Image (cartoon, helix red, strand yellow):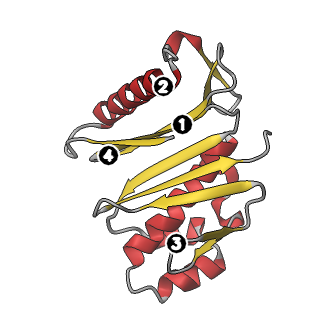
Amino acid sequence: MICRLFTEDNKSRTYQHENAVFLLRHAMLAAYGVHYDEKNIVLNPYGKPSLGEHPEIQYNISHCMGCVAAIIDDAGHEVGIDVEKIRPFSESVAKRVLSSAELSFLKNSADPERDFFRFWVLKESYVKALGLGIGFGLRNIAFSWDEKLNIRSTCENASFRLIEDVPGYILGACILHQNK
């Protein structure tokens, strides 16, 4: 399950995070009858949280200015999500996180901001599903898509989804089909 909540975009990161937890708490209760209680959270060595009492439920949250998102899976699959507001990006960041093929694609793109953030949310959702954080080496994974946004990647045992149904925002989600 993927859910989103649009918020005031001029608020702090703390405000956005609190809204993401609010969304997660209500989605878990509505969909699975599970009360999300921060006292029962277990962290992996890299800080990825999970529910100690419900190991079959995996989740992840993300937030940016103006939007919060959550992904929840009750089949034990590791999941990751990232949401971003489309905005100008730094070329130096692009060179640090994109593969050479992705950089070439971006150079020829008619909408480089949108395409940069497509790459970004897909990569971020993958490393969040792995539970490793962005120190993973984002240049080591590569993505491409066709005109219908069917996503191809170098990531094994993972499926991805891009959601762009609200102007100015891009959401990327990842589900790993094999537990670590």
Amino acid of disc 1: Asn
Q: Which residue is mark 3?
A: 149
How crowded is the residue under tag 2: few (<14 C-alpha within 10 Å), some, or many (20+)? many
Indicate which disc residue 11 carries. Answer: none
Disc 3/disc 1 C-alpha distance (Å): 23 Å
The reply to whether callout 3 and callout 2 are in contact (CB within 8 Å) is no
- Where does residue 124 sit, x and y in percent of width and height? 56, 53
* Rendered position, 40 above or below 134: above
Q: CA distance from mark 2 to mark 4?
A: 18 Å
Identify the residue at horizontal 65%, vertical 18% (top origin): 54
Disc 4, SS: strand
Q: Nearer the viewer, mark 3 or mark 1?
A: 3
Question: Where's residue 79, x and y in %?
Answer: 62, 42
Callouts 2 and 1 close, C-beta under 8 Å:
no
Res 23 quadrant in image: top left
Residue occupied by mark 4:
67
From the viewer's side, name the closer residue of 137 and 20: 20
Quarter holding the C terminus? Answer: top right
Residue that mark 1 sits on: 60
Confirm whether residue 81 shows in the render: yes
Disc 1, SS: strand
* Residue type, label 3: Leu
Q: Amino acid at mark 2?
A: Met
Q: Going by the image, does 121 lie left or right of 157?
A: left
Distance between mark 4 and mark 1 Cα atoms:
14 Å
